[in-house]
Image (cartoon, grey):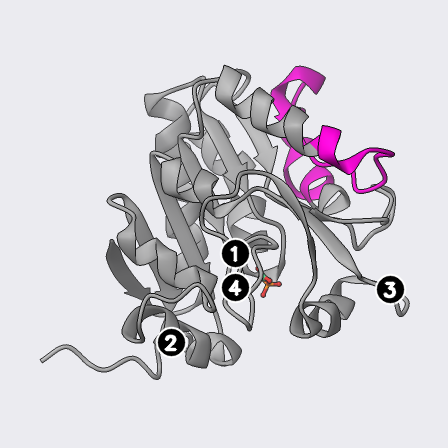
Amino acid sequence: MKITVFDDHQALSFQVAQMMVAQIKNKPDSVICLASGETPFLAYHLLPTLLLDEGVDHQQFTLIGLDEWVNIPSQNTGSCSYFLHTTLIGPLKLSLSQFKLFDGMAPDLQTECDSMDEFISKRGGIDLMVVGIGMNGHIGFNEPGVSTELYAHVIDLDDTTQTVGQKYFADKTTLGQGITLGLKHLQEANAAILMASGDRKAHIMKATLEGPIDPLIPSTIIRNHPNGLVMLDQKAASLLTPNE
Ligand code: PGA
């Protein structure tokens, strides 16, 4: 695992966007799994222009949505699906066969999980994952204490996730469960970028990088990833012990 600290959110986002461009350029049929949330928003916003500037063909890569709120329709502006449609799928004009997102309204959520696992394995696994980190150390909806051996699954959301998650929604919303790729997907991805930005992530980043590797802080698993990159801005890095 490698850690890189950037001056600010803008510099961090630009670098992540460039790494996504490089991934698609080097392997046009890449399978890329992307988180939703405030943290990666700017990187995704920058991506279409960078791809265009570099003349990179982006009609062959596959986008996988990392997670979704259960019982929230994709038309809800707080859904992960809505976020990925408005930031990337729409602007990049991705074809229907080029992306797969969880449907949080699916009548059979286990079938939804199986279908996602099968979709990924049929394409040879994930080349690159770009994930954020929750205040409780979750990655996707891999909440504290979750097994590191799971692929896609449905999970009861931790209190912190239910509370913090309100920020994405226009009205107060009941957030009971999530459907998510598992930590097994993260471990098996060829490369994984964990992004963190802002003061509010400083405590969890210190625990993630300097505490014990602990299932109660799922993000600590990134430290075992041979191609894990932790990319954070100065604010999120502000509590890290400085290098000697
Ligand atoms: P955020 O969410 O990017 O909106 O902070 C991160 C997360 O909960 O994974």
What residue is rendered at 39% in x and 49% in y? 193
Residue behind mark 1: 139
Is the CB–ligand 1 distance for label 1 below 8 Å? yes
Residue behind mark 3: 174
Amino acid on which disc 1 is placed = Ile
Residue behind mark 2: 207
Q: Nearer the viewer, residue 88 or 55?
A: 88
Which mark is in front, 4 or 3?
4
Question: Which is more N-terminal, label 4 or label 1?
Answer: 1
Amino acid on which disc 4 is placed = Gly
Residue behind mark 4: 145
The residue segment tinted magenta is 84-112
Q: Position of residue 117 (x, y in %)?
A: 58, 28
Q: Position of residue 123 (x, y in %)?
A: 49, 17
Residue 42 drawn above or below residue 62: below
Q: Nearer the viewer, residue 120 or 147?
A: 147
Separation (CA) of disc 1 from disc 4:
12 Å
The answer to whether one can see residue 11 in this image is no
What residue is rendered at 57% in x and 52% in y? 140
Task: Tell me if mark 3 has few (under 14), some (14-19) or many (20+) residues whose alpha carbon lies within 10 angstroms of its own.
Answer: some
Residue 62 drawn above or below residue 244: above
Q: Nearer the viewer, residue 106 or 93?
A: 106
Residue 86 drawn above or below residue 89: below
